[in-house]
Image: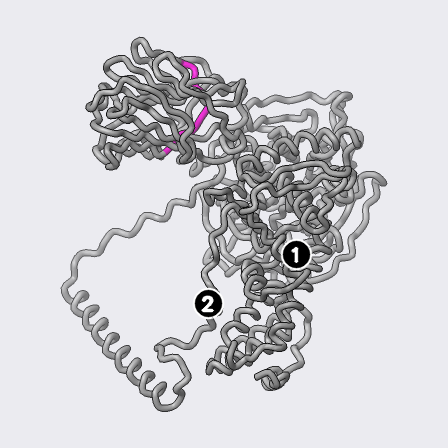
Amino acid sequence: MAFSSHEVVPEKRTGLQLTGGGPMCIDGAVDISFDLQFRPGMETYFGYVMRLITTQGQNIDLVYNQRLFSFNFVIGETFTRSFVADTMQLYSGWNRFRIHLDPQRQEASCYFNNRLMCKGRAALQPSTCCHLLFGASSLDRFQTLDLPPMSLKDIRITQNGRLAYFFPLADNGTDEVKGLRAAIKNPLWIKPRHQHWELVRSMHTGSSPALAFDARQEILYIIAKDTLYHLSIKDGQFGGEKLARSRDTLLPGHQAVYDAHTGLLHDFYIDQQRVSTYQPTAKEWNMNFTPAELGEYWHANKFLSPADSSLYIVAGYGQLQYKNKVQRYHFPTKRWELVATRGDSFMPRYLAALGTTPAADTAFIIGGYGSSTGNQAINPKYVYDLLAYSVKDHTFRHVYQLPEPERQFCFANSLVIDAARHDFYALVHPKDRFNSQLQLIKGSLHKPAYQWMGDSIPYSFHDIRSFADLYYAPASKKLVAVTYYTAKNNVTQLNAYTLHFPPNPAVSAVPAAPRPFNRGRVLLGLACVLTAGALFFFVWKRWQFLDETDTPARETTSAPPVEKTPEAAAPVERHPAIYLFGEFEVTDKEGNDCTKLFTPLLKELFLLLLIHTVKNGKGITPEKLYELLWEDKPLKDARNNFSVNVVKLKAILEKTGGMQILKDAGRWKLEVTDPALYIDYQVYMQQAAGPVSIPVLREIADRGSFLKNVPYEWLDNIKSDVSIKITDLLLDYMAHADLQRETEFVLQLTHAVFQFDQLNEEALAYKCRCLILSGRHKIAQDAYLKFAKEYKESYGQDYEKSFREITREGSGNN
């Protein structure tokens, strides 16, 4: 449940009294725990989080002091102690508070995320009756309207270790243990806000508007002929700025983008290769479009690339042709060009969705409608592939193909990429109806699967007269969906919706009513079950007999053999730890996952410092840091940004422990202050320098390739060096191993090699030989066929070596 606070008038603020109309009586030692998160984007965060008032008049309060970024634990009129909480964690994740009441010791304690922060003397009776309040309070003598804008969930009260009350606060104030109902004033229920889209603005404007979104300020721009409208997602404020000079023509199919790096708003029309930029001081656009025939690039996708200061246009439809072109507009030179692309095939299409990584060096494009030839008259169809487009080398890479759904759908224009979790969010809709609906889906950037999320949005779809887009407001943590439809009278109906992030899964359909009991159907079903059981038993016994007489080495199972990854030793739990192999991960001394504390920028800064420190022991120069992280900013701004982010990074490292940032000989580096801190990259560098322990190296490699899914350009050569070195070390060991004696261990090593090089022929040969030596001939053949298939998909040609050749080569060490 969310609490309205200083952003609303006093009578609209939220209060929660768990005890309803009267006090709650509890016996013995009591724990009151709850999860808290601050609502982002507010100005004032001062006030009471919780108040416990006994019937004897003893107050125990938890109060947040915004000026000092601290919580005060107050008993009576005494501050027992203040403690500072990680502000980043308060806004970005849930935090567990626990108040422990000990009548025997006459003591009250406060725990924050399982750590004792403070305690003090309190007048508590063995059997205590009290009022328990959160937020605003109207209780006599203890009235307060000061509270921080917060969200609460999962309030638990235990007595002597047993759960007495539990208030989830998902969508009501009912206790799930005894059915007690809390008294709530002005609640903001969180769960429905993650399920149901809220219509925040509906308006009419002239024909052919364009949309752009400023994610930093969380402002949606609506570009009309004579007005620039703006809708604030933070506070819902809506306004319009009349243009000093009305635009002559707004052509259907034009689109707009907001450039966060320059702060400029651009409107562009692809057919005429024109980009018009808004001049805020003059309140006018610097270029008009001229009247034209129907466009060539309806529903094209677009993205901005700060790496080369360019606007990219991808795909589109017009004049009975689907497009697969990639066009580029270079802002500094104001030149358009057709980009020559390489790599996998990109089928002509429109009504696809596109989103980029945080650095905008890779664009992901999914789905759409088109044809292999581009001609609308030749077998048009829905497509469900995900492709990655590299800005650096202009290459398309096929990632995967989604399974074709029962009901076909296209996409709204943009993908929202969750880079930290390697997920995306998109809006989909059918193409074959006017009274349509947009439905949110959540998909993976690696696996061909998706999930329906939230509820649907009404959408009037009429091809070139309709448009829909999806954005993300990071400070407010909301998805923003915008739809418009232009009627024949050239009046456009535009609607904007928001949904709190992350969204909840879509509610499943209501199950069908149960059929009436039918004795005959039940007996028939029972007979079928018995018959199937008898048949299964016969087949199982038959397979068992064949196993015992024909192939002793084959596994005795009723299912075909399935390849299993060789069992490795259980991974060692290390805390604190920093893992760079596989997924980036940081844990503190207690084993808590601290990875989510790193924003994308802090993560890159941390990796630059860590890798350059471990790699050469010297660290990295400030100039190199400025160049890599803020190359588009003046030196003064880069320094300021660096100083601000180093302070934030130091706060995270203080929480995780074990490291500190320092400057030595003009270079920035990380110093390990806790010998117990485990850094897998540091261990790898020690192994690479020798002597080598293959089990240690294999444990590191089993997590995955170095900084898997971290796409920084400066990291490419380092990744390549690590991959080559670790592969060479593992293959060298296998070349001298006794395969008869070390069969399973060598299999584990081949698995580690494939983490870095999926098409390593030597690893395939060792894998197949070991499988054959252990009697798993069928699995060896399947592994070879799978490799050959992936080889052809990657290189476009058949794998030349036969199964017999690779299993015979190098047999000397068998």
Judge whether residue 147 is colored magenta.
yes
Q: Quadrant of residue 30?
A: top left
Which residue type does callout 1 highlight? Met
Which colour scheme appears in the figure? Answer: one colour
The residue furthest right is 333
Quickly name the residue at label 1. 685
Three-letter amino acid code at the position of disc 2:
Glu
Helix, strand or loop at mark 2: loop
Quadrant of res 282: top right
Give how far across and how far down residue 119 sits, in percent. 37, 24
Residue furthest to the bottom in view is 549
Nearer to us of marks 1 and 2 is 1
**In the image, residue 214 above or below residue 299:** above
Residue denoted by label 2: 567
Q: Looking at the picture, how far across and down is residue 692, in whole percent?
A: 62, 64
Q: Would residue 401 be counted in the magenta stretch?
A: no
Camera-side residue of 674 and 205: 674
Q: Tell me where the magenta segment starts and ends, as one range.
A: 145-153
Real-space CA distance between mark 1 and mark 2, rounded to the nearest whole angstrom? 26 Å
The secondary structure type at the circle numbered 1 is helix
CB within 8 Å, label 1 to label 2? no
Q: Identify the disc placed on residue 739.
A: none
- Residue 185 seen: no
